[in-house]
Structure formats: C-alpha cells, structure tokens
Amino acid sequence: MTIAPAQAAMYQEEREELISGSEAIGIACALADVDVITAYPIRPYDTVMQYVSKLKADGAFDCDFIVAESEHSQFEIVKHASAVGARTFCGSSGVGWFYAFEAIAVTAGLRLPVVAMVGNRALDDPGAFGVEHNDALAVRDLGWMLYWVATAQEALDIALLAYKVAEDPRVFLPFALSCDGSFLTHSQAIVNVPTFEQVQKFLPNYDRGRLLLHPDNPITIAPQVNEDWLMEIRRQSDEAMRRSTAVIKEHYEDFKRTFGRGDPSPFIEEYMVDDAEIVLVGMGTLALPARVAVRRLREAGKKVGFLRVKFFRPFATEEIQEALSRCKAVAVIDRDYSYGSPANGGVLFNELRSAMYAASNHPHILNFIAGLGGREVLVRDINGIVDTTQQAIDIGKIEQETTWVAVRE
Amino acid sequence: MTTVQDLPQIRGVKNIPIQEGYTSGHRTCQGCESALVMRLMIKAAGPRTIVVGSTGCMYVANTTYYSTPWVVPWMHTQLGSSGSAAMGTAAGLASQMRKGKMKNEPINVIAFCGDGGGVDMGLSAVSAALQHDEYNLLILCYDNESYANTDIQVSGSSPWGANSTFSPPGKVHNIMNKRWKKNTAPMLAVGHPNCRYVATACGSYGLDFTNKIRRALTIGGPTFIHSIDPCPKGWDYDPKYSHELGMLAVETGIWVQYEIVDGELILNGPTKAIANGIRKRKPVEDYLMRQGRFAHFTPDDLKMFQAKIDESWEKWWIPGVVPMSPEAGA
C-alpha cells in the first residue's frame, strides 16, 4: 500500500490544531486513508466535504472524491464501493439524510461498513438549519451503529474507532457519527491530531474477506430470500449488533492505549453521577451547558449529575441501569420528538424509560423537549429542568411526564 | 483512470464465446428476451466482470436465494441506482488499484436496469454516471416497456396506448397511457458530450448486440446501451414470437438501431436499410396487432400511431433519432 507523499507528510508529527468538528472528521478520513468519499451539499454536514475536497485538491488526500447528483446516489455509491473492498465515507443532514434513506436502509441490510457523518439538522419544512436529532435517530431500528459526538476531539477519535469497529468481521455494520449542527460542525476547538504511524498501528486495512465482490470471488450478493430466509438473515444482523458491544469495548481500550486519551466507557459519559439525586441525561453538545449547570448547582449544594449517552446504538442498557441505580429522579433532555409516542415524549426518553423498566432502581423519569431547530439550551433552562424534577421527588409523583422547555405557548 | 480489457469484435455468430456467465438457476418466463440479453451481455464481457443489477425482473426472476444464474460476481442495487452502483463499483476498484490495495487489472463494470430503473426513477443517477469519464462502466437498460416485475404497470418507456394494469382501456377512456415513449438513448447521448458510446440494441440481432457490448466496454469511460426486450407476459403474445417481435419493432421503424460513437451516428442493420431507402418500413399494425396490449386499438388509434412513426422518419432532424430541427432558413 502506498500513501500519497503529501498525505503522509502532513501527519508525521503529533500536533494540536484549532479546527471544527467537521474538519476533525475530514482529518480522520485522511488519516484512515479512506478510498471513496461522496458529497452532496446540504448544511451543516457539508463543511466536512468542503474540507476533504480541499485536502484532495492540495494533494494531501488520495481518495476518489465524487460529488453525487443526490444524497440517494451519494449513499448508493459508497455502498457499492464498500462491497468491492474500498473504505468509504459520506454523510448528510436533515432531509438530505432522508432523501438517501432507501440506500441507508439497505447498507445496513447488506452489512457494509460504511461510515457516515450526520450533521444533525431539523427536518424542514418549515425551513430550519439548526440541530435536531430526529434525522439520525431515524436509523435506530435498521442496524446502524449510532454515536453522538460532543467535541471536535471526540469527532476525530470516534471517526477512527468507527472504521475499526464497523470493519471488524464480527460486526460488519455501518456506523453513523452524529454531530450537532453548528454547535459541533462549525465550532472550533483545539484538537490533538495523531500521526499516520499511530493510526496505522490502530487501524488495519479494510478486508472484506470472503464477502468481497470481485471476479476472483464470484459471489451473488442480495438475492431474493423472501419468507424462506429473511428471518434468519435479520437474526444474523441482530447478533452482529449484539456482538458490537464487546467489540466496541475491545477496540476502545486499544484506542486509549494507542492514543493515550478517552473516557472510562465508550458508551456513556458520567459527570458527577455517583452520588447524584437528580441525573440529567442527554446527547451531543448539550453536554456543555449541562456540565456548567451541574457544577454551579453542586456549588449551591444540590446533588445533581449529568449522564451523556454516547452510543445510541448499540444502547448501553446495563451501563445506564447501573449509572442510574442510585438516583431518585432522572431528567431526560431530548433534542428530538416523537409525536404520539408514550407520554408524548422524545425518542431518548422513551428508550431510556424502557431500559429502566428491568432495573432494580426505579427513579422518577421525566422528559424535557429542548433546543429544537438549533435553539440554544441555556444554563437557566437546565436549572428549570432540575427544579421541576425536584418537585417530583418532593411530592413523590410525576405530575407532567413531558415538558417543552422555553417554548412560547 | 484504470485500463480497459481488449475485447475484439466478433465476426460471425459461430465465434460468439461458448463460455456462459449467465446459466441455469433463474426462473424467467418462457420466451423472456431479457434473459437472452443477460446471457449475451455476459458472453460478450467475459469472466473478469462485475455485474450490478437494479430491482426489476432481472433481479427478482433471476436470483432466488440458494440458486443464482450468475457465474460472475453479481450484486443487487436499488431501483433507481444503476448509475450510482456502476460508479461506486468502478470508483471502489479504481481507488484501491491506484493505491496498491488491490491488484491492478482491467475489470469490466456493468450495471443493468429495466425501463423503470433507467428511464424513470434512475435517470438522474444514470446521467450523473455518464458525466464521470474517469470511470469505465457500462449501463445497460433492458427495456420491456413496463414495470413487468410488479404486475405490468405503465412506465415512461411504455408505448402510447399500451394496456397495462395502470393503464387499462375502459368504457370511457379507451387510451389511458397518453404519454409517448421517452426517447432515452438520444437524450443521454446529446446531454453527455463526453460519453463516448451510446447505442440502442435488440436481442433479436444477437451478433450485433454482443459486439455493441464489447464496443461499449473497450472504448473506455462511461457508456450506455438501451435494448428493446419483447416480453410475452407484458406484451401479451405467444412466447415463441419474442424474436420475431423484436425484429418487427425494428422493421416497422418503431425501434431504431444505432450506435453513437464519439459523436458519430452509425445506423445498424434493417434501420440502415430503411434510412437508405433500400427497405420499406412495414406498417406499424403488423407489429402492434400481434400483441394483446394493443388489442383495444381502434382504426383511428392505429392511424395516429402510424402518423407519429411516419413523422419521426420524415420530419425529424435525424430520422428516428433526434426530433428537433434547426430553424428554417438557418
């Protein structure tokens, strides 16, 4: 294998760079020496593609960069490139992700390890560029691994982990990196950029093995199976997703050893959860105001913590049950909605409440819908959420399961 | 850009390779001309080929799990994705070969689609693929003039007036499909000047068909072939007449056989003879009335159909191919 000289030269020494979350993922793609990348413009994810195209133009990234004529084609192209053994990357946002949905669904069905970035965006109409999580969450039942990133550093790190996990033959499932529009895609932070050498040590080449579509291995992929076999094949995908939990743990440990950073768990991040009476739960960049609020409330003597769900798929049921085994109440903050769902709540709330049904501890679980369409979730909003949750503890019951935060009535 | 295989033109039907790439294991209908098209396609292309097929008869009828007629590597793609599938396959190979991750050798990439996948839903992706002249690929649209896999529904490539389950003749409306068949191959040739090879074809002319596949694969870059495939089920005729109906489509001037090679139009077979005045076009009635899908046609309907075909030969700028004309006197 040969790496383009300019590409190799860029990453000879470890360094720090002030970059956005999108740019961090673009760098991860170059470090992973991705073969085929497809782009189609939609805000806010497309900043990653602008960055990748510049790297390619400057000779700093040898990849086939294809500007597709639609999101559907974007995802179909990488699906087929992945089937012939190429490492691939693509992405989208909001309705663009939905335009590609047919291709997205079958990519998981075909067990192809495509890595995609979702720059979370509201599903307009009415027009809105800002973050909502409903776009990425739509794949939650289809066999995509789904991760919510909180920082630019994490975006780079998890992009590398994504390839290692997705391309592990025990898994062979696609991986979506969810990044909050603007708050992550467009916000810069200092990021530690590893060297090629480190990455190559961590990330082996993608080997499709006996599933490679090639004249030397003339297989037929995705024939008609119908009722005769579909159930068994679905079951295989289910087993792959179940196996992914252990594979993620294994590779995350390897990641921490190689790069010298990372959290205790790849699945969740706990911030002052241990002795907390009230635990806030959320995903993505919400972590920033949540941590600030928790810190200030702690200073005021209130026992509050924050649990960030990183992997939405696979959902870390047992770890979450354990983390919430000591608290009195949980406030799930959803940057999404699920109209007509139980409690008319959000997706994360219903998922988490379901996970807690079999837990030994049964805290009050309240839901707060906040920050839709990119509206900022402020520290004072979080204070209000904690107050409402405290009331449930005080009176011993939940008066209102789902509350929309800072919404004009 | 990756290299192409050297696939010489075949002189004489006896020289068509004996080796099969599409064999038993499918369950296409008796008289299915598209099955023949698949067989000839892969005979022409040879074993160092990857075939990708979009949803349609040639997916559903061909590949039932635990059996496959494909000796070459084959993969399904979505209904509207033949263009993207071809491009993704070609790009995946090209990238890995360039970077030394895969042995560098010419591998043919063929994506096929039916008329639903190519003329209707997948047109945008086909068009995009034909713009990317850094990739070697062939898109073959096998046109049986309806969504024949799902119960025979009208497509943008169905002939005017054809009876289908979405365009049945009724008590008030005798003609339900009022759309004239889309002129797909010229549209793609005119619209993609860097595409070096666009052709129409018909399985009734086996040698011509095989050689067109070979020309498309050897010329390099993205190419497109549109074949007309008589379909006993959708067109409603005795399966033994498939070949004959393909020939009649050409002899009546309804289907025009040609290649566009680097911008030059070359008419083939009976079409050439018609254009040169050596052969007279047969009346469209000879073709239409052999098929149940036109059984409801009134004499006026037949007259109208004939007039449209006459117009395409007598009034079009390039007879049978390009409808518009230069401004009078220009």
Image: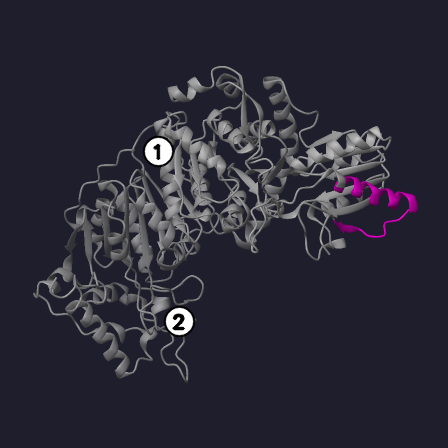
Labelled disc at residue B164: 2
Residue at position x 77%, y 45% in the image: A353
Taking the magenta stretch, the answer to whether it contains residue B63 is no
Which of the pair B310/A206 is nearer the observer?
Answer: B310
Visible residue check, residue A63: yes
Q: Is residue B5 above or below residue B27?
A: above
Which of the pair B138/A339 is nearer the observer?
Answer: A339
Residue at mark 1: B94
Which of the pair A382/B73 is nearer the observer?
Answer: A382
Give the residue type at disc 1.
Ala
Q: Main secondary structure of the magenta part?
A: helix
Q: Which residues are magenta?
A: A381-404
Q: Quadrant of the N terminus of chain A?
A: top left
Q: Please state the chain letter of the residue tagged with numbered disc 1 in the rendered image.
A: B
Residue at position x 58%, y 29% in the image: A152
Q: Position of residue A223 (x, y in %)?
A: 46, 49
Mark 1 residue element: helix
Residue at position x 42%, y 45% in the image: B75
What crowding class fits label 2: few (fewer than 14 Cα within 10 Å), some (14-19), or many (20 or more)?
A: many
Which of the pair A114/A177 is nearer the observer?
Answer: A177
Mark 2 residue element: loop
Labelled disc at residue A130: none
